[in-house]
């Protein structure tokens, strides 16, 4: 039968249902497995576990496909705005003109940050990483906006607040870290323009918006907007499954994203390229080190759990990187190193055998540098982009009729029952 899988253990057979997604992805439903057989499944890092059904994002790692709500990311990067893509992810379809206008008004109305929050920012030690600050501040939003999040209207308000304020808070933390006056959001500017203005405008040098820079930021955020059940999204879903408030769930996602194997890779890539540059530009040494099993070094911006081919986002990012530098008449030696590194790695047997290709983070840091974003803010930029995805996934999980609190099992490998030994009888090593 097509819709059942049979497993046999010690002569006894059990049948488990098969679930098939709209793109023919297949899963064995193991919900009854433990009750019927006494077995649990073992899958470290959840590499082969489907934790939910989702209609938000589709990825095919073998073919290099990424679609939000069915729309290829390439089309969105060419034709959409970040705001529209955020609406698409969160609400399930592209907005009409009226819906988009209403969404913009709500974002503008909620873009200011409570003035009392400024003192929080000012009291973080100067060397604090902006991701730590952002995660703490998003969690703190709950104290400033303690309203319930149960009706659709309340949830929509919380969602809009997050989308509008995270952008303001990110720019604010940058300004305060530099000891500069905070620039407030302007209702006449669009989402990305507003962010750039809040980041770079000063009373001495007014920031001039450049069309190509605004578009680059727009595309950067669209490319990061969702990526199905990755580490930070899973954190949002798992933390949210305890029915915690949305701010706390998103704050958990920000913390998870910070890691260098996940969103923190964009900062790690630039640090790696800088190190190669400062060391004389020997990119081949980095490839050799990445292959050495006795060296913990990895080629940052390479490899992906799902993509076993070129990350479709990296293709767009690389093209955009070239165009942006050309338009701005900038020369970045790190781009040359990145391209040479990529060329050598893609021809190397280790990288070919392991299916290691550049991922979204490989070229994104060079785009951000060209825009003027400081390196320690790179992962914050990823977080702002990923926010609509986290929100969409959280909403979907809250509405899921199959929702249950996240609670995996384990295979215990510790001591069997043993007894307390009084201090006087313990052996010294
Ligand atoms: N450089 C060298 N070797 C690598 C790399 C790398 N960047 N990535 C994976 N490998 C090797 C790894 O050593 C292992 O080799 P072996 O099988 O011989 O022991 C094999 O490839 C499989 O690696 P894995 O760690 O089991 O793969 P994973 O799916 O658990 O990890 C990853 C995926 C992204 C964490 C990993 O590829 C990595 O550490 N990459 C560098 C960090 C990075 O660029 N992260 C950004 C990911 S994209 C943005 C996002 O969505 O988070």
Image (cartoon, grey):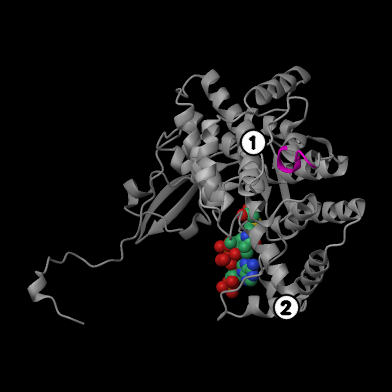
Q: Is residue 292 left or right of residue 33?
A: right
Name the quadrant of the C terminus.
bottom left
Q: Which mark is residue 389?
A: none
Q: Residue at x 74, y 20 (%)?
A: 101
Residue on which disc 2 sits: 279
Q: Is mark 1 within 8 Å of ligand 1?
A: no
Q: Camera-side residue: 192 or 429? A: 192
- Count of marks, rendered view: 2
Q: Residue at x 13, y 75 (%)?
A: 426
Q: Does 272 appear above or below 409?
A: below
Residue on which disc 1 sits: 168
Find residue 299 and report its horizontal and vertical position in percent: 66, 69
Q: Is residue 28 visible?
A: no
Q: Camera-side residue: 164 or 174? A: 174
Q: Label 2 neighbourhood size at 10 Å, few (<14), some (14-19), many (20+)? A: few
Find residue 47 and report its horizontal and vertical position in percent: 53, 57
Find residue 278 and report its horizontal and vertical position in percent: 73, 74
Measure the C-alpha gap from mark 2 to mark 1.
37 Å
Looking at the rendered structure, the secondary structure element under dot 2 is loop
Quarter residue 361 falls in:
bottom right
Which quadrant of the frame does ligand 1 lie within? bottom right
Q: Is residue 224 visible?
A: yes
Residue 200 highlighted magenta (yes or no): yes
Q: Residue at x 62, y 25 (%)?
A: 110
Find residue 51 and report its horizontal and vertical position in percent: 49, 45
Quarter residue 270 falls in:
bottom right
Range drawn in magenta: 198-204
């Amino acid at each position: 039968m097509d819709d059942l899988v049979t497993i046999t253990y010690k002569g006894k057979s059990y049948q488990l249902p098969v679930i098939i997604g709209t793109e023919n992805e297949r899963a064995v439903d193991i919900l009854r497995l433990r009750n019927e057989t006494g077995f649990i499944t073992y899958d470290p890092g959840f590499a082969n576990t489907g934790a939910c059904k989702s209609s938000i994002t589709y990825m095919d790692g073998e073919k290099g496909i990424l679609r939000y709500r069915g729309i290829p990311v390439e089309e969105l990067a060419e034709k959409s705005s970040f705001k529209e893509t955020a609406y698409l992810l969160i609400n399930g379809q592209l907005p009409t003109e009226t819906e988009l206008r209403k969404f913009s008004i709500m974002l503008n109305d909620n873009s200011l940050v409570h003035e009392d929050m400024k003192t929080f920012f000012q009291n973080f030690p100067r060397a604090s990483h902006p991701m730590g600050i952002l995660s703490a501040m998003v969690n703190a939003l709950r104290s400033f906006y303690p309203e319930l999040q149960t009706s659709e209207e309340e949830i929509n308000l919380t969602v809009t607040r997050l989308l509008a304020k995270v952008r303001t808070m990110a720019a604010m933390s940058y300004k305060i870290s530099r000891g500069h006056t905070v620039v407030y959001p302007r209702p006449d500017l669009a989402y990305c323009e507003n962010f750039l203005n809040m980041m770079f405008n000063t009373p001495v040098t007014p920031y001039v918006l450049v069309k190509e820079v605004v578009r680059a930021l727009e595309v950067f955020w669209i490319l990061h907007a969702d990526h199905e059940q990755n580490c930070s999204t899973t954190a949002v879903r798992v933390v949210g499954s305890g029915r915690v408030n949305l701010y706390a769930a998103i704050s958990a996602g920000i913390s998870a994203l910070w890691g260098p194997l996940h969103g923190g890779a964009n900062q790690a890539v630039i640090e790696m390229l800088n190190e190669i540059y400062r060391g004389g530009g020997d990119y081949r040494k980095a490839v050799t080190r990445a292959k050495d099993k006795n060296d913990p070094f990895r080629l940052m911006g390479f490899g992906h759990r799902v993509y076993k081919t070129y990350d479709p986002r990296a293709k767009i990012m690389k093209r955009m990187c070239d165009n942006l530098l050309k338009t701005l008449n900038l020369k970045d030696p790190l781009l040359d190193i990145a391209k040479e590194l990529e060329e050598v790695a893609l021809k190397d047997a280790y990288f070919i055998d392991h299916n290691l290709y550049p991922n979204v983070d490989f070229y994104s840091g060079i785009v951000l540098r060209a825009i003027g974003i400081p390196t320690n803010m790179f992962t914050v930029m990823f977080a702002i982009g990923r926010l609509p995805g986290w929100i969409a996934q959280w909403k979907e999980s809250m509405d899921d009729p199959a929702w249950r609190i996240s609670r995996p099992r384990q295979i215990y490998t510790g001591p069997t029952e043993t007894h307390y030994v009084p201090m006087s009888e313990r052996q010294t090593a």
